[in-house]
Amino acid sequence: MKALAARRHHPMALLVILLLALVATGGLYAALQPQTAQAEAYTESDVEAGEALFLANCATCHGRDAAGLTDADGSTLGPSLIGVGAAAVDFQVGTGRMPMQASGAQAREKPQQMNEEQTRQLSAYVASLGPGPSVPDEEWLDTSKGNAERGGEIFRINCAMCHNAAGAGGALTRGKYAPPVVGVEGKHVYEAMDTGPQNMPVFNETNLSPEDKRDVITYLETLEETGSPGGISLGSLGPVTEGLYAWTIILSLLLGAAVWLGAKAK
């Protein structure tokens, strides 16, 4: 006991205690942080191939170290990718949004520039830079286990204000927009909720559980399969297009009637 008491007053004792506390905190964080997606079995060759793809296709905007770049006036050319995880890469590259063809208010969906293997390798490299959301496991994409009714409720509460209740998308400010989500691959819907691309907020486990996300995907698939039971959907954009169609038809009929009556009067 005397020996322990003597060491307790050693100048290095406080540093050792601090280091032990940091190790314990880091261990608890790693053990308790949410794990919503599968642990990808990336190999060293996947990471190396992904780094080569990154340097050839992404480093111009995101920097050779993936820490992001800014131009001379301080505007961001490309954000940091450290900690965004494999899910963000799989979504952006898998939907063709990245690499971007031209700068704009936001990245537009287009045909994929990389195949599935290249996308996987690029995801492996970015995942190696820091912990982040992983590509979701097939369990959370299996809509046979989802609840479309509950998913519709979640969607209307959290998503409809931008994507509209029918999932047809909508306009935002300054040239930005919420894209349509009906007909989008379930994996990409999950990844978008998990990573929050563009102007979309992040819905991690503290907001929506994996089961919640699966229910939303099930609801969107149900919308796609159901179509428009009431007839022509007019883009599912609500009273704007409905009013346009109604007034166009009514005005056309009134104009035709006026011409007909004028011709009869002669």
Image (cartoon, rainbow, N blue to C red):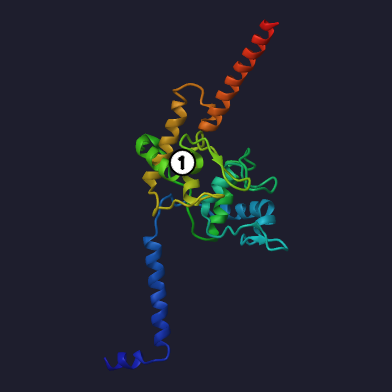
Dot 1, crowdedness within 10 Å: few (<14), some or many (≥20)?
some
In the picture, measured across the screen, residue 146 lies left or right of residue 124, that is left
Residue 17 lies, in percent from the top left, at 38, 81
From the image, which quarter does the C terminus lie in?
top right
Relative to the observer, which residue lies in front, 95 or 230? 230
Q: Is residue 154 visible?
A: yes
Figure check: 199 above or below 138: below
Q: What is the tally of numbered marks visible in this picture?
A: 1
From the image, which quarter does the N terminus lie in?
bottom left
Tell me which corner region of the image, top left, top right, bottom left or bottom right, holds residue 261. Answer: top right
In the picture, measured across the screen, residue 163 lies left or right of residue 108, that is left
In the picture, measured across the screen, residue 70 lies left or right of residue 220, that is right
Q: Is residue 188 visible?
A: no
Residue position for label 1 = 160
Figure check: 54 above or below 187: below
Residue 97 lies, in percent from the top left, at 61, 44
Name, please, the residue furthest toward the left.
1
The secondary structure type at the circle numbered 1 is helix
Residue 87 lies, in percent from the top left, at 51, 49
Relative to the observer, which residue lies in front, 65 or 170? 170
Picture residue at 67% right of the left edge, 60% below the top: 75
Figure check: 233 above or below 260: below
Name, please, the residue furthest toward the front.
265
Relative to the observer, which residue lies in front, 262 or 109? 262
The amino acid pointed to by label 1 is: Ala
Picture residue at 63% right of the left edge, 39% below the top: 110
Residue 102 lies, in percent from the top left, at 70, 46
